Image (spheres, grey):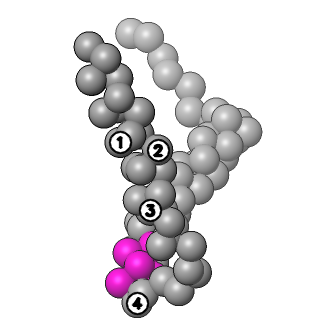
Amino acid sequence: MKALATIMGIIAPATAFAASGAGNEESGIFVWIFLGFFAVIAVGQLIPAVMLMTGLVKGLTSKNEAKSEAK
C-alpha cells in the first residue's frame, strides 16, 4: 500500500506538466475551419427561429376575423 502511494505521489505531479507546451496562441487553419463550420450551423438555426417567433407574434396580435359556426 505504501508503494502504491509513493508511485501515485511521483506520477501525479508529473502529469501537471504534460500540457505545458499548449501556451502558444497560433491556431491552425483547420481550427478556424472547424469553428467557422459550427458558426454557420448556429446562424443557420437562428434564421428559422426568428421566422417562427415573428409568425407567432403576428398570429397573437392579429384579430381573428374568421368566425366558426357550430352546426
Disc 2 or disc 3, which is closer to the eye?
A: 2
Amino acid type at mark 4: Ile
- Image location of residue 35, percent across then percent down: 45, 73
Q: Residue 13, labelled with which disc?
A: 2
The mark that comes first in sequence, 4 or 3, is 3
Disc 4 or disc 3, which is closer to the eye?
A: 3
What's the residue at 48%, 83% (across, down)?
27
Instruction: Name the foreground residue: 65 vs 56.
Output: 56
44 relative to 51, above or below: below
The mark that comes first in sequence, 4 or 1, is 1
What's the residue at 53%, 86% (across, down)?
26
Disc 3 or disc 1, which is closer to the eye?
A: 1
Q: Residue 29, labelled with which disc?
A: 4
Q: Which contiguous range is marked in magenta?
A: 30-35
- Image location of residue 59, percent across then percent down: 62, 40
Confirm or deny contact between disc 1 and disc 2 (CB under 8 A).
yes
Which SS class for mark 1? Answer: helix
Whether residue 62 sits left or right of residue 25 in the image: it is right
- Image location of residue 58, percent across then percent down: 66, 46
64 relative to 39, above or below: above
The mark that comes first in sequence, 2 or 4, is 2
For mark 3, what is the residue?
19
